[in-house]
Amino acid sequence: MVEQKEMNLTEDEAALYDRQIRLWGLDAQKRLRAARVLLIGLQGLGAEIAKNIVLAGIKSLTLMDHTVVTEEDACSQFLIPRSKIGENRAEASVERTALLNPMVEVTADSSDIAEKDETFFQNFDVVCATNLIKDQLLRINSICHENKIKFFAGDVFGYHGFMFADLNEHEYAEETIKKKKESGEASAKKAKMQEEETVVSKKSMSFVRLKEALAVDWSSENMSKLLKKVPKTFFIIQVLLRFRAQYKRDPSPKSKEEDIVNLLKLRDQVLEELKISKDFVDDSFASYCFAELSPVCAIVGGVFGQEIIKAVSQKDAPHNNFFFFNGLDGSGMVDCIGNS
C-alpha cells in the first residue's frame, strides 16, 4: 500500500477546489490530492465513477480495461466517442476523463487484470473493481485487505446495481452539532438564540471481505430471521455474477429469451446452495437484467464516488458494507452483511 499522505495545495488547486474545501475541509482535500486510484472496468458504471472522483481532485487515476469498445457502450459510456468502436476501452476513455480535471494524472492500462500480481496493487491507495467475475473480485479483495488498500466493487445489470466496500479497519472523523451550555442567566429570548457548536469525534469501523459477506449461512436461526429484511438485489447480483462466470458475458438483449431461461436456472441453483427457497426471488427479475442503464449507472456511480471520497478523506461515516439499488421501484438501501 502507498503510505497515506497529505499533499500541500498550490494556489491554483486551492482556487479550483475552494467549494469542496468549504464543504469537507482543507485536511480532507489534501488527503484526496494524495490518493492514487485504480479503476478496473470502463463501461457505463466505470465512466460515472471516473467522472466523480476526478472532479473531486484525487492525485492520479489509472483506467484499466483489456476489452474493446462496442456499440452498446453508446448507451451509458459517455467518456468514449462513438468513433472509437473497436478500440481499447481504457485508452479510449483517457482523453475525456483528463479534460474533466487537468490537475489529475489520468493514465490507461490495456492489460488484463488477471495477469497482475500482488505487487501491482501495492501502487494504489484505492482499488475499484467493476465488470469482473466473482473469483477475480475475491482475489483482488484478498490482496487489498492484506495490504490495507481500500477496496470497492460493484456492477450494474439492467435495473439492478450494487456497491461493496472493504476498508479494513477504518478511522474517520464525524461532526455533530451541539448546543452550547447556558450560563446562569437564562431567559426565554436567550433560549431561542442559543448558540450551537460543531464537535468533531474520532471514530473507527471494521469491515469484512467480500468472501465473508457472500458466505453467510442463511439457514441458521439468526440469519433466517433477518432474511426478509435483506434486499433481494443481493441474491439477484449473485445470480448475475454466476451467469457472467459461466457464459463469459452478461445477459444480452440480442439473446434475451435464451438468457432469461438460463437466468432462472441459475437462480434456482444459487438459492438452493444458499438454502433459500427459489420463490424468494420471483421469475420476473430475469426480464430486467439487460444492459447497463445510464440512470442506474449514474445513481450507483454517484454512491461509489461519495464513498471513495469519504474513505480517502476520512471524513464522515462510510457505508458498511453494501449499497443496493433497485431501479424498478427506485429504492436504494445500505446493508451490512457478513459483519457480526
Image (spheres, rainbow, N blue to C red):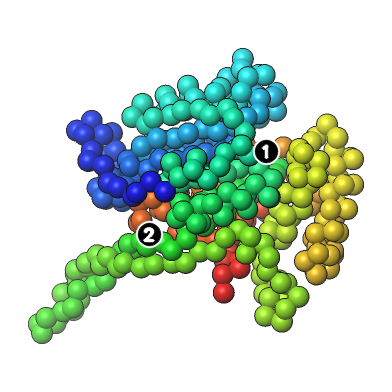
Q: Is residue 257 left or right of residue 184?
A: right
| Residue 281 falls in image quadrant | bottom right
Checking the image for residue 58, the label placed there is none
Q: Amino acid at mark 1?
A: Glu
Residue 201 place in picture, x, y as percent: 30, 68
Real-space Cα separation, disc 1 to disc 2, in angstroms: 30 Å
Identify the mark nearer the N-term, 1 or 2. Answer: 1
Question: x, y percentage for residue 27?
Answer: 26, 50
Residue 108 position in % (x across, y down): 51, 27
Q: Which amino acid is tagged 2?
A: Asp
Residue at 73 percent of width and 49 percent of height? 241
Q: Position of residue 46 (x, y in %)?
A: 56, 37
Residue depicted at x 34% and y 49% = 3
Farthest-out residue, left: 185
Question: Residue drawn 68% across and 50% down?
Answer: 135
Residue count near mark 1 (Cα–Cα under 10 Å), binned few <14, some 14–19, many ≥20: many
Answer with left or right where residue 66 lies relative to residue 219. Answer: left
Total marks shown come to: 2
Q: Which residue is mark 1?
A: 292
Q: Where is 217 relative to 270, above or below?
A: below
Residue 316 is tagged as 2
Of residues 208 and 285, which is closer to you in this image?
208
**Most distant residue in the bottom direction:** 184
- Asked which secondary structure carries label 2, the reply is loop
Residue at 67% across / 80% down in the picture? 222
